[in-house]
């Protein structure tokens, strides 16, 4: 499965098809259609959130998938596939890759990332596990714990990295990650133009994951509206 996922997605675009309950496109039916549109446009893989969306998308397209469950807990800021319960639920869908928060933050109910990964790998030995990281140190942690892949998903989205953008300073953070990582690196997080995606691959990223710039029309519209509104001020 590892060979197959990397073979099919290396050097290509993976599109994140997600909508949260408060967003206008929140619907497994709509996310499946979004995935069909993405694949029709050339996407080599899909990243999806929730068991319902994963299963709906799996029925609609045949490309490899990265699965997650976003769930908030009151005792932790970790929300991407945060506990063993969510990890196993995603594994049960049969997706090729299960992604989870790979930061060193405290997890819900004080669960340990090492324990979560060990349990999941023992029960689903054919599944690949990806650590969504925000620092170079977390790349090293992911490799030590036995993850199969890392992604830059959380850079700019944690307390420690808030406000940062992966393209800042000529992609300095990505360059540091690539110099450190021995695992395949998926570049994700604020890749909002084709030019940035191309640069991420040129620097050595394994593949690029793009979400909001493709699949969140309210965000795309807001960027256009904001730019035009500057003319009326």
Image (cartoon, rainbow, N blue to C red):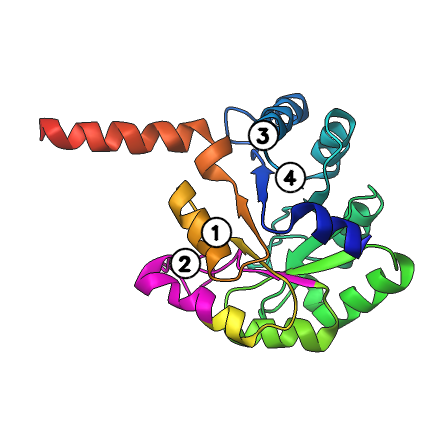
Residue 73 appears at what percent x and percent y? 62, 53
Name the residue rendered at 51%, 40% in the picture.
Answer: 211
Of the numbered discs 1 and 2, the one sitting upstream in the chain is 2
- The magenta segment: 149-175
Task: Assess whether mark 1 and mark 4 are in contact (beta carbons under 8 angstroms).
Answer: no
Of the numbered discs 4 and 2, the one sitting upstream in the chain is 4
* In the foreground, 44 or 99: 44
* Mark whose residue sits in front, 4 or 2: 4
Instruction: Check disc 2 and report the residue beneath it.
Output: 166
The answer, for residue 90, to whether it is visible in the render is yes
Asked if residue 162 is among those painted magenta in the image, a careful observer would answer yes
Indicate the secondary structure of the residue bearing disc 4.
Answer: loop
* Mark whose residue sits in front, 4 or 1: 4
Q: Is residue 191 left or right of residue 126?
A: left
Residue 178 appears at what percent x and percent y? 52, 69
Q: Quadrant of residue 213?
A: top left
Name the residue rendered at 71%, 30% in the picture.
Answer: 57
Which numbered disc covers residue 189?
A: 1
């Amino acid at each position: 499965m590892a060979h197959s996922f990397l073979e099919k997605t290396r050097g290509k675009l993976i599109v994140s098809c997600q909508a949260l309950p408060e967003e206008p496109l929140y619907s497994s039916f709509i996310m499946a259609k979004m995935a069909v549109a993405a694949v029709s446009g050339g996407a080599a893989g899909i990243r999806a959130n929730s068991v319902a969306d994963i299963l709906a998308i799996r029925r609609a397209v045949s490309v490899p998938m990265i699965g997650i469950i976003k769930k908030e807990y009151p005792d932790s800021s970790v929300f991407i596939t945060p506990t063993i319960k969510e990890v196993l639920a995603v594994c049960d869908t049969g997706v090729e890759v299960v992604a989870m928060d790979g930061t060193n933050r405290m997890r819900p109910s004080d669960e340990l990332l090492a324990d979560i990964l060990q349990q999941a790998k023992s029960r689903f030995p054919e599944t690949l596990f990806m650590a969504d990281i925000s620092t170079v140190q977390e790349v090293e942690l992911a490799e030590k714990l036995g993850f199969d892949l890392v992604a830059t998903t959380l850079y700019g989205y944690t307390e420690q990295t808030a406000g940062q953008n992966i393209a800042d300073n000529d992609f300095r953070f990505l360059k540091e990650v690539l110099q450190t990582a021995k695992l395949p690196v998926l570049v994700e997080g604020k890749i909002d133009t084709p030019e940035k995606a191309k640069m991420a691959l040129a620097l050595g990223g394994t593949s690029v994951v793009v979400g909001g710039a493709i699949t969140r029309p309210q965000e795309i519209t807001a960027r256009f509206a904001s730019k035009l509104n500057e003319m009326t001020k």
